């Protein structure tokens, strides 16, 4: 079976080197990133990929978001380095990298819109990656909407990556999250909350051609289908200080139906139960193979291997298997057959 890894991460060398010169770069880029060579070293990355046959990747940046690395003038520079570097990698190694997803300086929405246009029209980008909040701001603020319109106009997806850190506490009486709860449970919540803001703000009605890929198989949404479905059909029943039934009146369909309009990837760290649940919810036409390489305990190959094994263990038609493994990615990202 052919596999196109639709959501995995890499830093082009020019960007990686520039990040090291930023004030506080060691803390900003994260201790873990520094210790995962396959995220920035091309030879290491190729050795990981060589373990799998008929396998290629659509690459995007790893954490943290560019807008968290500095003021707008810095993030604009970093975005250009990232996207120029990605375009060069795709041109040099088309057999390895089927495409790339551009990064944007989202703390300057006007500059981000210009960079999105440049990435699509001049650099051949196959999509855009943004994070579930922009330095704490929600994605349904009006200043970000032109970026979504650009993605829709170019027919390329918006990839939604969770972003949350230990400074967001688990309890109101504390000032930080404990035991990395901010990551294990916080990231799926972040993604799910961002998806909800896209739905209830009306963005998906205003920009019906926008295609959004929710990382990690749609996060919490498939498992909580009952709450998202009949639960949110009763929006407003639990709120007394405003009339939220007006939100439902404005929407063109049930909230659950919008959530099913998202695309989702199979990067759930090798969990068969999560994969079965997610594929049941989204179906074979809305799921794309992805591994989240190289963030497994082995530094690259583990999640690829485990995700392939999980998919191979699930009974499905050959047509559906091909859709999930590579055909949906080809269509979504506009990749060559």
Image (tube, helix red, strand yellow):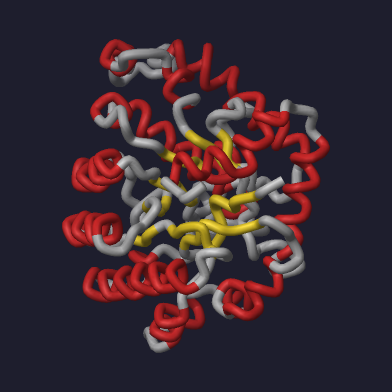
Q: Which residue is drawn at 42% across and 46% down?
A: 334
Question: Which residue occupies the foreground of this view, 329 or 250?
Answer: 329
> In the displayed structure, does residue 256 sit left or right of residue 177?
left
> In the displayed structure, does residue 94 sit left or right of residue 68?
right
From what the image shows, is residue 232 above or below residue 53? above
Residue 295: x and y in percent read 65, 63
Give the farthest residue toward the left.
110
Give the image quarter of residue 319: top right
Question: Which residue occupies the foreground of this view, 287 or 130?
Answer: 287
Give the image quarter of residue 193: top left
Residue 175 seen? no
Q: Residue at x 31, y 14 (%)?
A: 252
Q: Residue at x 28, y 26 (%)?
A: 202
Question: Which residue occupies the foreground of this view, 290 or 93?
Answer: 93
> In the displayed structure, does residue 300 sit left or right of residue 61?
right
Residue 156: x and y in percent read 36, 44
Question: Which residue occupies the foreground of this view, 201 or 45?
Answer: 45
Q: Which residue is drawn at 62% across and 37% down?
A: 324
């Amino acid at each position: 079976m052919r596999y196109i890894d639709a959501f995995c991460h890499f830093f082009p060398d020019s960007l990686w080197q520039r990040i090291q010169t930023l004030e506080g770069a060691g803390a900003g880029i994260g201790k873990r990133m520094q210790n995962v060579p396959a995220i920035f070293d091309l030879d290491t990355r190729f050795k990981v990929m060589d373990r799998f046959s008929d396998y290629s990747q659509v690459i995007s940046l790893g954490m943290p978001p560019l807008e968290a690395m500095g003021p707008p003038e810095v993030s604009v520079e970093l975005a250009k380095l990232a996207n120029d570097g990605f375009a060069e990698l795709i041109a040099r190694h088309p057999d390895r990298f089927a495409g790339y997803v551009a990064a944007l300086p989202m703390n300057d929405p006007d500059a981000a819109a210009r960079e999105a246009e440049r990435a699509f029209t001049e650099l051949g980008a196959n999509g855009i990656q943004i994070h579930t909040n922009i330095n704490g701001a929600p994605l349904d603020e009006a200043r970000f909407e032109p970026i979504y319109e650009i993605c829709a106009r170019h027919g390329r997806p918006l990839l939604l990556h969770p972003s949350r850190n230990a400074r967001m506490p688990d309890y109101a009486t504390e000032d930080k999250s404990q035991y990395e709860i901010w990551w294990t449970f916080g990231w799926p919540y972040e993604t799910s909350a961002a998806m909800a803001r896209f739905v209830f703000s009306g963005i998906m009605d205003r920009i019906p051609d926008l295609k959004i890929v929710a990382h990690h198989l749609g996060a919490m949404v498939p498992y909580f289908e009952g709450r998202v479905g009949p639960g949110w059909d009763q929006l407003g029943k639990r709120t007394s200080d405003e009339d939220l039934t007006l939100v439902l009146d404005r929407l063109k369909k049930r909230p659950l139906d919008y959530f099913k309009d998202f695309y989702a990837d199979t990067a759930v760290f090798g969990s068969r139960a999560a994969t079965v649940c997610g594929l049941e919810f989204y179906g074979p036409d809305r799921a794309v193979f992805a591994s989240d390489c190289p963030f497994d305990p082995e530094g690259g190959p583990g999640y690829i291997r485990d995700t392939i094994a999980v998919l191979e263990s699930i009974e499905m038609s050959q047509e559906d298997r091909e859709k999930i493994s590579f055909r949906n990615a080809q269509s979504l990202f506009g990749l060559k057959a």
